[in-house]
Amino acid sequence: RIPGRDGVLVLMNHQSVLDIPLVVAAIHGTYPRIVTRKRYLRWIPLISHMIRLYQYPVVDPRANSQETKRMLASIRDAARSSDVPLAIFPEGTRSRDGEIGRYRPTGLKLLLKQRPWTVYVLVADGFWQRAKLKDFLRGVGDIRGRTKLVGPFEWEDPRGDTDAFCEAMRRHMVESLADLRKPDPA
């Protein structure tokens, strides 16, 4: 379980619409604020409501420069002032094959530069084949998902080397996914 307190940052791979409920379930005693794509504000059962209710910072890769500045300011503000954990999907988009994709580190680096963090890496597998809502609804009974939690890792200096830290966290994700995919000896 991930402690539900301020200063906690959760990094998770992104496989399906279930990732948001998975990260919420992993937090002990509270809920996280999750950096989420603006398009998820459209009607998606439970997810859209959570975004509005818990004031998730939203991003839109298609935004114009003025909107982008407002979104980045919102993420900075959330990082500095949130009294609950923050979560982000550093890949920025769902994986089509379940593998860990390349990081799109802008949001993660922005969060790291705002304050010290206790960072947890949450990796999920088995959800990517039912990534979209329509696929999920058709085959929810076929999902055999698993998760692995790694950490904590301390990020103590907001002026530190964000590139090296991001790469180390990505390595942890890749290794954790490989562990989840090892055949069960039983």
Image (cartoon, grey):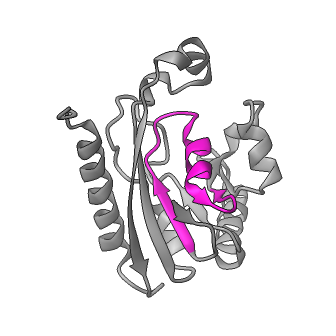
Q: Nearer the viewer, residue 21 or 16?
A: 21
Residue 50 percent location from the top left of the image = 75, 46
Q: From this viewpoint, which residue is outermost toward the left? A: 185
Residue 168 percent location from the top left of the image = 29, 66
Q: From this viewpoint, which residue is outermost toward the top? A: 138
Quarter of the rendering containing residue 22: top right
User: Is residue 29 in the magenta section?
Assistant: yes
- The residue drawn where x is 80% and y is 41% is 49
- The residue drawn where x is 58% and y is 77% is 7
Q: Is residue 48 above or below residue 136?
A: below
Total of numbered circles in the picture?
Answer: 0
- The residue drawn where x is 43% and y is 23% is 129
Q: Is residue 168 above or below residue 14?
A: below
Q: From this viewpoint, which residue is outermost toward the front? A: 186
User: Is residue 27 in the magenta section?
Assistant: yes
Q: Which residues are magenta?
A: 8-34
Q: Nearer the viewer, residue 171 or 141?
A: 141
Residue 75 percent location from the top left of the image = 65, 66
Answer with left or right where residue 90 lies relative to residue 20. Answer: left
Q: Is residue 103 above or below residue 180?
A: below
Q: Nearer the viewer, residue 43 or 28?
A: 28
Which corner quadrant holds the C terminus? Answer: top left
Answer with left or right where residue 26 lies relative to residue 178. Answer: right
Residue 33 percent location from the top left of the image = 67, 59
- The residue drawn where x is 60% and y is 64% is 86
Quarter of the rendering containing residue 164: bottom left
